[in-house]
């Protein structure tokens, strides 16, 4: 079992920035963020392979977000810049443990563990 505790999020105007963090209770294989807006599918935002620090980003990110990790603290952070109203939604931390089945880095099935989510609201 991996417990995930999220922090950050909130409300910001378009063009602003927010930082999300997620702390895991034990070592993970991959860790990062998905988001879900009302009426839309859950989509990947950014994932990092924690052992080697390799990041992957959803297509919509377009260089605006940066995911980073602090392995000593088992924490992953997502710096979001130049936010747009379409970025609004519930951001959920996701993680997989070593040995978990892998279906693709951008597939929610690959992540067995999920946080409660933190709301991001971007106003125009």
Image (tube, rainbow, N blue to C red):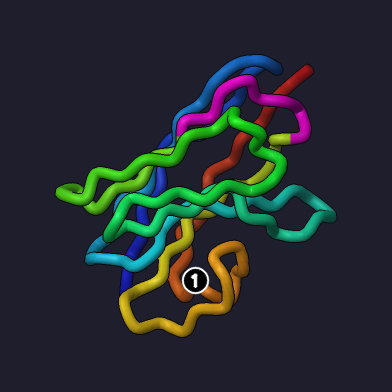
User: In this picture, is 79 found above or below 35?
Assistant: above
Which of the two residues, 63 or 16, is positioned nearer the viewer here?
63
User: Is residue 47 rendered magenta in the image?
Assistant: no
* Numbered range of the magenta stretch: 79-86
Quarter of the image holding residue 8? top left
Q: How many marks?
A: 1
Q: Position of residue 81 (x, y in %)?
A: 56, 23
Q: Position of residue 5 (x, y in %)?
A: 36, 53
Which image quadrant: the C terminus?
Answer: top right
Which image quadrant: the N terminus?
Answer: bottom left
User: Is residue 84 rendered magenta in the image?
Assistant: yes
The residue lying at 47 percent from left, 75 percent from top is: 112
Quarter of the image holding residue 7? top left
The residue lying at 24 percent from left, 53 percent from top is: 74
Q: Is 73 positioned to the left or the right of 101 in the image?
A: left
- The residue lying furthest to the right in this view is 39
At numbered mark 1, what does the secondary structure look like: helix, strand or loop? loop
Residue named by callout 1: 111
Query: What crowding class fits label 1: few (fewer than 14 Cα within 10 Å), some (14-19), or many (20 or more)?
Result: many
User: In this picture, is 88 found above or below 1?
Assistant: above
- The residue lying furthest to the left in this view is 72
Q: Position of residue 123 (x, y in %)?
A: 74, 21
Q: Position of residue 89 (x, y in %)?
A: 68, 42
């Amino acid at each position: 079992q991996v417990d995930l505790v999220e922090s950050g999020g909130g409300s910001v105007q378009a063009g602003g920035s927010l930082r999300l963090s997620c702390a895991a209770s034990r070592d993970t294989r991959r860790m990062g963020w998905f988001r879900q807006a009302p009426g839309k599918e859950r989509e990947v935002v950014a994932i990092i392979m924690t052992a080697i620090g390799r990041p992957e980003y959803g297509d919509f990110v377009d260089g605006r977000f940066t995911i980073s990790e602090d392995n000593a603290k088992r924490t992953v952070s997502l710096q979001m810049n130049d936010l747009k109203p379409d970025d609004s939604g519930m951001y959920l931390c996701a993680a997989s443990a070593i040995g978990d089945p892998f279906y693709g880095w951008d597939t929610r099935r690959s992540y067995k563990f999920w946080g409660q989510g933190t709301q991001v609201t971007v106003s125009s």
